[in-house]
Image (spheres, rainbow, N blue to C red):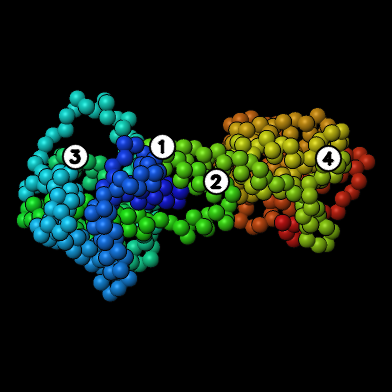
Amino acid sequence: MTGFLNGVAVLIILGQFGDLTGFQSTFSNSVARTLDLLLRLGRIDFHTTFLGLLTLAIIVLLLRSTWGKYAFIVAIVISTVLLAILSLQGLFTVEAWQNVKTVGEIASIPRSLPSLGLPDTGLIGRLILPAFSVAVIGLIQGAGVSESFPNPSGKFPDVSRDFLGQGAANIATSFVGGIPAGGSISGTNLIMAAGSRSRWANIFAGILVVGVVLLVAPLVEFVPMPALAALLIVAGFQGLRVEAAKTIWQTSKVSSTVMVMTFIFTLFIPLHYAVLIGMALSIVLHVIGQSNKIIVKEWALIPGGLPEERPAPPTVPGNKLTLLQIYGSLFFAAAKNLENLLPEVGKAERAVVAIGLRGKSDLSSTFINVLERYAQLLKAQNSKLMLVGVDPVVYGQLEKTGLLYIIGEENIFFATRKLGEAMNLAVAAANEWLQLKPGSPAFSNPSPEQGDPE
């Protein structure tokens, strides 16, 4: 998300250089257009660039003053009035200042509200995939904006409610010819910089826009395009998440890799593809990272004392109980690594291996297959596998897959509210089983009443 939002902010900035300088590149990509501009600085329009940079300077200076809330509107008004004066007075040449593009040259703004209309149902089939892509982009941008701007209370808004609001608004505006809209980084930065404090700011902004359209729409057409470009450049800079990027870069290699790759994709390919690639890359790297974080430890019982955590033995010792605790995720990608980390059964006779599963509320089919193979190996050597701290849901999985029959119901110990109770019961049962074997060495383990081996 951070890579995507920073990429969008950079695209907002780079996308304004054409209107800021009057040089319109033939390239479609914003990065390519910027490089084209740098290679052809002699072709920029002086008057357009002057007005754009002047507006930019006014905004920056006002933002640092007590007039910060009015910086954008004041800068736009000054630039518009200045261009009108320079064009009328003929400073330098009348044609030069008249060549500076205004909003009216891009589109005319009628003094009326849009009329109601029904959608063309014949276009639904062709628009389903584009609509899905636009929805993904809108929701992701909305989620990013929501997580970047807390409410006045300090809490972040409910993303689900934001999604509902965006969907309802887009459905409503579709009946008046509105284009799809989502969370806007530049728009949010603008309204925040103007001093907004609640969601009512957007409602009043909408009412004000209606008033402007009905009363002074022709005047808006005189606003210079370089002035608007300067405004959006500032909004783009305000949308950069530099501190968040630094934190991610210093925290996790996986996260920083996803962030950088998503940022690069956002700059060079369509946004919906960048988002999907970033999501896929994040999932792949997460799976790789989690599968390499699986750890197996042995809990060695100390008579009269607390258990001691040690590295898991390379092989299962015979005629003895081995307590194993698994740390990390047990999802499918980690299961193979776990199988390699479990002690080899080898030729161990009359051994008991107890694996702690407390806190594991769901097992993947791959992990269940690993347990099945391990239980069969132990069974072949006249040994047994115990599962300790089992969740009821996990028990259901063992029963449905048939693993419960292989391990034996008597070797399953449910997790209880008392920490260590299940492990104590398993230790007592394993001791009893070992002692029933002729010639098995007695091993003094704490009973359930003697304390908590966990």
Q: CA distance from mark 2 to mark 3?
A: 39 Å
> In terms of secondary structure, where does tag 1 sit?
loop
Which residue is nearer to you in this view: 399 or 14? Answer: 14
Q: Earlier in the sequence, mark 2 or mark 3?
A: 3
Number of residues whose C-alpha sits closer than 10 Å to that of mark 4, classed few (under 14), some (14–19) or many (20 or more): few
Tag 3 near tag 4, CB within 8 Å:
no
Number of residues whose C-alpha sits closer than 10 Å to that of mark 2, classed few (under 14), some (14–19) or many (20 or more): some
Comparing labels 4 and 2, the label whose residue is closer to the camera: 2
Return the residue at label 3.
174
Up-down relation of residue 293 to residue 47 (above or below): above
Return the residue at label 1.
269
Mark 4: which amino acid?
Answer: Thr
Tag 1 near tag 2, CB within 8 Å:
no
Mark 2: which amino acid?
Answer: Thr
Return the residue at label 2.
257
Residue 192 found in image quarter = bottom left
Comparing labels 1 and 4, the label whose residue is closer to the camera: 1
Mark 3: which amino acid?
Answer: Ser
Image coordinates of residue 165 in percent, x first then y, are 27, 49
Q: CA distance from mark 3 to mark 4?
A: 67 Å
Q: Earlier in the sequence, mark 1 or mark 4?
A: 1
Return the residue at label 4.
315
Which residue is nearer to you in this view: 220 or 425? Answer: 220
